[in-house]
């Protein structure tokens, strides 16, 4: 059963990711955007990548391609998605990641208890995609890493941890996730 979907903005990125996963024992395949891939095909692979060929197009079109791809490859809770981006940071990164997050959240809203974002463009894009007007900042976890809740939209009140894109130490993500687990446990 497929448990990971990688959405890449070009075929090279999709294949490079596949090669890395294959080296780690995953049964892997790459598909082009719009290919008719049914459950029978997906059951043959642990992970798949889809090339949206969206690097050089306008953000709205990239957003649309990522959304249709994510909707075509909805996975059950416990599986993961990755948005593969160009190593030189070209393309529609914010729009693509925001749409992937929004699509997954819409499909699994009961299972999602919180969000984690890194980088202002990504955080802004996710807030826009979720129709949130802002974030109520509740605490600083460490410099440039904060905890808060979304304001407005259908996910108002959803906890979020966000950090500056290039800020942080090696253990920042681990510290943020530990903090978030404590906050979620306090809410129960």
Image (cartoon, rainbow, N blue to C red):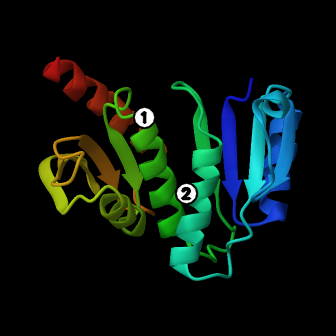
Q: Quadrant of residue 90?
A: bottom right
Q: Is residue 23 visible?
A: yes
Label located before the other in sequence (1 or 2):
2
Is any part of residue 82 visible from this angle? no
What residue lies at 82% left-to-right and 43% top-to-bottom?
Answer: 20
Residue at x 41%, y 42% (from the top left corner): 105
Residue 171 picture location, percent across and down? 44, 39
Give above or below for 93 relative to 19. Answer: below
* In the foreground, 153 or 40: 40
In the rendered image of this protein, does residue 125 appear above or below residue 16?
A: below
Q: Say whether residue 64 is left or right of residue 106.
A: right
Rendered-image quadrant of the N terminus: top right
The percent position of residue 117, horizontal first and vertical second, equals 39, 52
Q: Nearer the viewer, mark 1 or mark 2?
A: 2
Q: Which residue is mark 2?
A: 67
* Disc assigned to residue 174: 1
């Amino acid at each position: 059963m497929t448990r990971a979907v990688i959405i890449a903005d070009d075929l090279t990125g999709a294949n490079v990711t596949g090669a890395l996963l294959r080296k780690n024992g995953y049964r892997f395949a790459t598909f082009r955007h719009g290919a008719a891939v049914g459950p029978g095909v997906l059951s043959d692979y642990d992970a798949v990548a889809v090339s949206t060929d969206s690097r050089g197009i306008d953000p709205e079109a990239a957003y649309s391609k990522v959304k249709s791809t994510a909707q075509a490859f909805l996975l059950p809770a416990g599986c993961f998605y990755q948005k593969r981006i160009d190593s030189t940071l070209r393309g529609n990164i914010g729009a693509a990641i925001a749409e992937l997050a929004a699509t997954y959240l819409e499909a699994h809203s009961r299972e999602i208890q919180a969000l984690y974002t890194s980088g202002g463009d990504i955080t802004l894009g996710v807030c826009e995609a979720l129709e949130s007007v802002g974030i109520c900042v509740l605490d600083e976890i460490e410099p440039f890493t904060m905890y808060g809740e979304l304001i407005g939209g259908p996910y108002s009140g959803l906890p979020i941890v966000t950090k500056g894109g290039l800020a942080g130490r090696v253990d920042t993500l681990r510290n943020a996730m530990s903090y978030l687990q404590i906050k979620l446990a306090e809410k129960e």
